[in-house]
Amino acid sequence: MQAKAMAPGGGALRLQGTTTTTGARPDKSRLWTTRLQKELEGLWADPPEWCVPGADATDLFHWQVVVVGPRGSPYDGGVFAVRFKFPRHYPLKPPKVTFATKVYHPNIDPRSGLVCLDFLTDNKHWWTPAWTVDKILLVIVSLLHEPVMDGRAINPDAASLYKRKRPRYMEIARAKTLEHATASASSEKERPQSRGVSLCRRLMARVAFLQTSG
């Protein structure tokens, strides 16, 4: 039998083998899949502030969430696609979290977009199954407000400017946001992908709503 779960973007995800045999030993992988399904439903029902579930997903283990640049940060007005790649043993191991949209930030790899924080990259010492996707998203939004500077930054140039020349760091981060993460940037660079442009325009409406509410 098959069970369906809603994927980010509205598609249905088909999961094979979700039934169990009476008296059979519990399958941990199915328990973990159930955890992911519940988190996905929770994300759609009540997303964290400045976050919008949506875009495409190929299966339950690959999500894309949009993070809107929070007000008061140099990323204000930006729309950033953030991808989650879950290991088969989630939540015993952390997801791989990357920015698909280019962003200038001390804790984000400028080449791959990987979010480099201890609890996401060092699952032996820092990760715990108590972490959930909504909590990770809250950390990411907080990160856009204030980078974590208590370790070695993955983007040393951005970290150096943040510590020593904060106004210059803010200027570059704003410029990169305008270049890569706004509606005008999407319309110019993603014109062949009309679906992506349409999504970006809808999200910019969400930006306006967030900026005027509260």
Image (tube, rainbow, N blue to C red):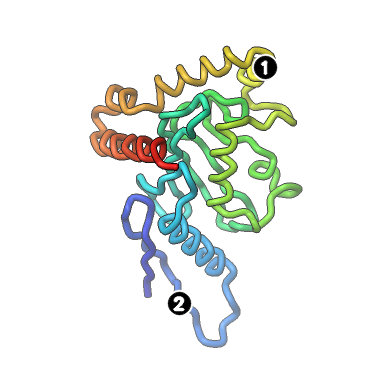
Q: Quadrant of residue 214?
A: top left
Residue at numbered disc 1: 160
Disc 2 vs disc 1: Cβ atoms closer than 8 Å? Answer: no
Task: Kindly state the secondary structure of the residue where label 1 is placed.
Answer: helix
* Quarter of the figure with residue 119: top right
Q: CA distance from mark 2 to mark 1?
A: 53 Å
Q: Which residue is mark 2?
A: 19
Question: Is disc 2 surrounded by few (<14), some (14 to 19) or many (20+) residues within 10 Å?
Answer: few
Please state the horizontal and vertical placement of residue 24, each as a whole percent of the image: 56, 83
Residue at 46%, 27% in the rendered image = 102
- Could you tell which of marks 2 and 1 lies nearer the N-terminus? 2
Residue for point 41% across, 29% down: 77
Q: Give the crowd class for mark 1: few <14, some 14-19, many >=20 residues within 10 Å.
A: some
Q: Position of residue 166 (x, y in %)?
A: 62, 16
The residue type indicated by label 2 comes to: Thr
Looking at the image, residue 209 lies above or below residue 179: below
Residue 2 vertical position relative to residue 21 in the rendered view, above or below: above
Q: Nearer the viewer, mark 2 or mark 1?
A: 1
Tell me what residue is drawn at x 47 percent, y 39 percent.
Answer: 82
User: Where residue 122 appears, x then y in whole percent?
Assistant: 70, 43
Disc 2 is placed on an element classified as: loop
Q: Horizontally, is 139 left or right of 37 in the view? A: right
Q: Viewed as shown, does residue 155 lie left or right of 76?
A: right
